[in-house]
Image (cartoon, helix red, strand yellow):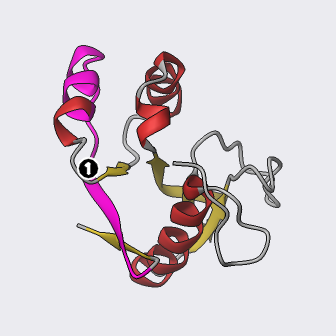
Amino acid sequence: MSTILRESRIETLHDQVVSEVAQRWAKAFQCRVTIKTGLDPQPWTDLPQESDILGWDFSPQGKDILWSAEIETDESLSDPDTYRKWQRVATPGIPHYLLIPRGTRALAEKMAASLDLRFSSIYEYGFVNGVVQVQ
């Protein structure tokens, strides 16, 4: 589902979900958040980031990664590279979340199981009046 979205500079469904979820989760987790979208392939922090969203904060040792999240679309769930990326970005001891389009949970769970990969949570998203709804 490629579409031009209302917010300026956000041109893909993926980037809209990344942006909206990152804003909400920064407040919910009370941490700093860095995103990786097609608009900004080089995140502004010096953290190594392959995940779509990275929650982090400062500590006496530097920057601590608190959690990461992957946002998938119908198109990306049909791409085998997506599943290899899941394996690359999963870091033991750091919560890792997956957000997928509503109705694709069975496929995502099957693929994660085939990789022996466990997400901290898998959420499904959809749109109501153009706003991302996460369940």
- What amino acid is found at the position of numbered circle 1 in the picture? Ile
In the image, farthest residue toward the left: 106
- Judge whether residue 56 can be spotted in this image: no
Residue at coordinates 34% horizontally, 51% vertically from top-left?
101
**Other-residue count near label 1 (Cα within 10 Å), few / some / many at <14 / 14–19 / ≥20:** some
The residue segment tinted magenta is: 108-129
Residue at coordinates 67% horizontally, 63% vertically from top-left?
4
Residue closest to the eye, 123 or 48: 123
Residue at coordinates 61% horizontally, 57% vertically from top-left?
3
Relative image position of residue 67 (x, y in whole percent): 45, 55
Residue closest to the eye, 57 or 123: 123
Q: Find out whether residue 111 is within the magenta segment.
A: yes
Question: Pointer 1: what residue?
Answer: 122
Relative image position of residue 26 (x, y in whole percent): 51, 77
Is label 1 in a helix, a strand or a loop?
strand
Relative image position of residue 75 (x, y in whole percent): 48, 35
Q: How many marks?
A: 1
Q: Find out whether residue 71 is within the magenta segment.
A: no
Q: Quadrant of residue 128?
A: bottom left
> 58 above or below 47?
below
